[in-house]
Every structure is written in C-alpha cells, then in structure tokens.
Amino acid sequence: MPHHDNPLVDLLTRLVPRMREYGMVSCDVPVGGGQIKLDLAPQKTAEVAHHSTAPAAAIVQTVDALSPEMGIFSEAVVEEGLHVSQNTILGFVDVGPLRLALEAPIAGTMLLCLVPVNSVVGYHQPVFRIQPD
C-alpha cells in the first residue's frame, strides 16, 4: 500500500535504496510518456560549511545534519536557538512505512532548519544547520 498520495514519491523511496544496494549511481526511470534521469550523489558524512558573517569578519563554522535517506522530512522536534547534544534526535524522515531519526552529528546550537516539513529530501541532503560548541 502506498505511503504517500504521490506515486512518484513512492517509486523513488523504493528505487533509491535498491540503487545504493547494487552500487548504481544513475538510471533512467520511465514515467508516463517520458522519463526521469536519476543521479545519486556520493554517500558522505556530515558536511562542514564555512559562512562569512560580514566582509572581513571572522569565519563562523557550522555543521549540517544530513537526511539519513531519501524520503519525506515529516517532523522537526527541535527549534532554532536550542542547544543539542551529539546524537540528539532533531527530526524524522519517512521512507515508505519506515520513520528514520535524523540525529545531530555534533553538540551545538541549532541555527536553522533548511527544509520545510513534509518536503521530499534527498539522501544526505542538509536538513539542519548547527553551530558547534
């Protein structure tokens, strides 16, 4: 039974894990009268991004909390400004009938949520930005 009203989302949430399982990085998916080219980004761990707060100002280091898998970002359980410990659950990504926890890769302060709730997220897509302690 489909988990979402959109059959394309259901197809992709089943297809992406299989592609990763068999080491595929690209495939063409027939959809209706056309096709979608699906290219998977390489697997990676937490990303470190550098953002300048102002010209000639000190660089602020941030770390992004990444989606554990492609799916629907279904719930955020933290708010901006909240201090979190490493491995604190920040939110959830639904993949078909599964609900996967999205955890903080480091301890720090929540800066912002990068993705609206109920949006499709890609594998290891940045979802939250954290300023390390």
Image (cartoon, rainbow, N blue to C red):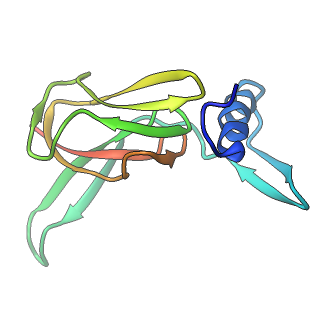
Q: In the rendering, at what x and y percent does residue 6 appear? A: 65, 46
Classify 14 as above or below 117: above
Quarter of the image for residue 34 reads bottom right
Classify 13 as above or below 53: above
Report the label total.
0
114 displayed left or right of 41: left
83 displayed left or right of 75: left
Question: Residue at the location (84% across, 51% down)?
Answer: 28
89 displayed left or right of 116: left
Q: In the rendering, at what x and y percent does residue 118 appear? A: 44, 45
Q: Residue furthest right?
A: 33
Quarter of the image for residue 66 reads top left
Q: Residue furthest bottom?
A: 55
Where's the C terminus, which quadrant?
top left
Question: Residue at the location (62% across, 42% down)?
Answer: 5
Question: Residue at the location (30% across, 53% down)?
Answer: 49
Where's the N terminus, which quadrant?
top right
Q: In the rendering, at what x and y percent does residue 39 appear? A: 70, 50
56 or 4, which is in the foreground? 4
Q: In the rendering, at what x and y percent does residue 61 appear? A: 19, 51
Question: Residue at the location (44% across, 37% down)?
Answer: 67
